[in-house]
Image: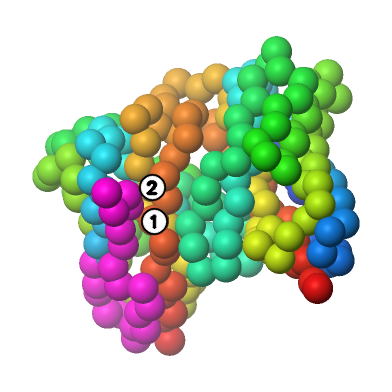
Amino acid sequence: NAGVTQTPKFQVLKTGQSMTLQCAQDMNHEYMSWYRQDPGMGLRLIHYSVGAGITDQGEVPNGYNVSRSTTEDFPLRLLSAAPSQTSVYFCASSYRGAQVEQYFGPGTRLTVT
Amino acid sequence: KNQVEQSPQSLIILEGKNCTLQCNYTVSPFSNLRWYKQDTGRGPVSLTIMTFSENTKSNGRYTATLDADTKQSSLHITASQLSDSASYICVVSAIGKTSYDKVIFGPGTSLSVIP
């Protein structure tokens, strides 16, 4: 039982490049989400999904896209990277959203130059 | 405005000593409060959750308290160990329209336990 996995662990992008952060969970959770963590700030919700085929925006969705074709996978796409997207990104899953215990992945540290 | 504040921002203590971390919130209407532990380079892991009717909850050497009247919570760590070195995040949930609505993460307290 791997829990929540994320790839890559580290990534450096140039401004304007695009990429996809991968997230997978093997706990059969319907709810999955993406957060970004910046120094001195709490985790902020980017996008979330309440089930396959259903996604919605969180607090800071601009510049990011998501899709949910399967229960297990929830990739996050950066369309055109900007230095302001330099951050640590966490994927999380749970059986009922953020109001209950969420299980977080190990994170992806992204630097945009 | 829904907010969660934590203090101190960082803390250094000697191994074996006790410490208390604070969380103040303005989130309403209150649903629950959770403490997460985040080791360096890892994702947060839940330590404990408290609802409105609970004053104290323990998880091993970790004891959380909640005062819903003053909107304050504390996390007390007893007989600290080197493995307690981490960031401790307070998360407060309000009753919202969706399962992700009104869930506010605090900025965390960075704890360093030194030998």
Q: How far is the residue under mark 2 from the one under mark 1? A: 6 Å
Give the residues in magenta.
A1-20
Give me the disc on residue B37.
Answer: none
Give me the disc on residue A105.
Answer: 1
Vertical comparison of B68 with B100: above or below: above
Q: Is residue B22 left or right of residue B88?
A: right
What residue appears at the point 23 percent right and 36 percent down from the top-left corner? A28
Q: Position of residue A19 (x, y in %)?
A: 24, 72
What residue appears at the point 15 percent right and 37 percent down from the top-left corner? A53
Residue placed most toward the observer, A111 or B59? B59
Give me the disc on residue A92.
Answer: 2
Chain of the residue displaying label 2: A
Position of the N terminus of chain B, as image quadrant, is top right
The kind of residue tagged 2 is: Ala
Local packing at callout 2 (Cα closer than 10 Å; few below 14, some 14-19, many 20+) is many
Chain-order first, disc 2 or disc 1: 2
